[in-house]
Amino acid sequence: MKRMIFASALAIASATSAYAATIEATEQNLLAIQQYVPEATMIDLEAMSDTEIRVILNAISSGDSGGDKASTVRALFMDASDVDTESATTSDFANEANLVAIQQYVPEATMADLANMDNEKIATIMNTINSGDAGGDKASTVRSLFEADDSMAMNANATSDFVNETNVAKIKAYAPSVSLADLARIGDEEVAIILNIISGEDSEGDKRQAIQARFE
């Protein structure tokens, strides 16, 4: 009898453990993650471990600023789901969910436009959309990224670690008229200084003034 009771208790414990391992893959958590990774699906969550999902949820509930949080959540998601901009197919990013989000800022955008973009470009646009930037600045940045000359971006990225669309998006939050060509003109060292200003502890107003001055 004791053995039967123990076996039953063990079976219950095993079932409880199995439930606990998948409890994080819920619709509620999926909706929370989709605010930062719109293309996320329940299949993605079910393929992740309980710990991986909790790490992502902790990042979402952190006190980080909008832009930093969006980048962190997307990076954690891509790492946990073994998807990145180099290995993912174009269709992973060129989807209806991302198109609808982009059309809020670029109404004329089509699925064909997304299909012609690489994953990194679409991911950069989505990170900007999910950032905490003000409406006007965000709209300007999203359109600029959407209309960016890919050939120029490729040439810039081929010779520089700092001159890229991701940094353009970050800097545009403080200097909306800045383009990839501006970053190429001032060079890596100057871009690095600007990024340090952005990550510094000065007020947003002081950051904006200091960054705009470096492009004058």
Image (cartoon, grey):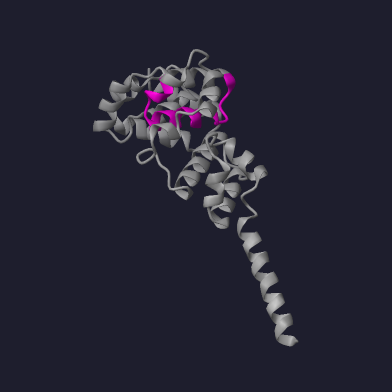
Asked which quadrant contains residue 40, the reply is top right
User: In this picture, is 5 found above or below 202?
Assistant: below
Q: Is residue 194 shown left or right of residue 187? A: right
Name the quadrant of the C terminus. top left
Residue 171: horizontal and vertical position, in percent? 44, 27
The structure residue drawn at horizontal position 62% and vertical position 63%, both measured from the top left corner, is: 18
Residue 74: horizontal and vertical position, in percent? 50, 40
User: In this picture, is 56 found above or below 175?
Assistant: below
Q: Is residue 180 shown left or right of residue 199? A: left
Q: Is residue 114 magenta?
A: yes
- For the residue pair 147 and 172, the one nearer the viewer reads as 147
> What span is colored magenta in the figure?
113-135
Q: Is residue 33 shown left or right of residue 171? A: right
The structure residue drawn at horizontal position 48% and vertical position 21%, both measured from the top left corner, is: 142
Q: Assign the magenta stretch its main secondary structure.
A: helix
Residue 164: horizontal and vertical position, in percent? 35, 29
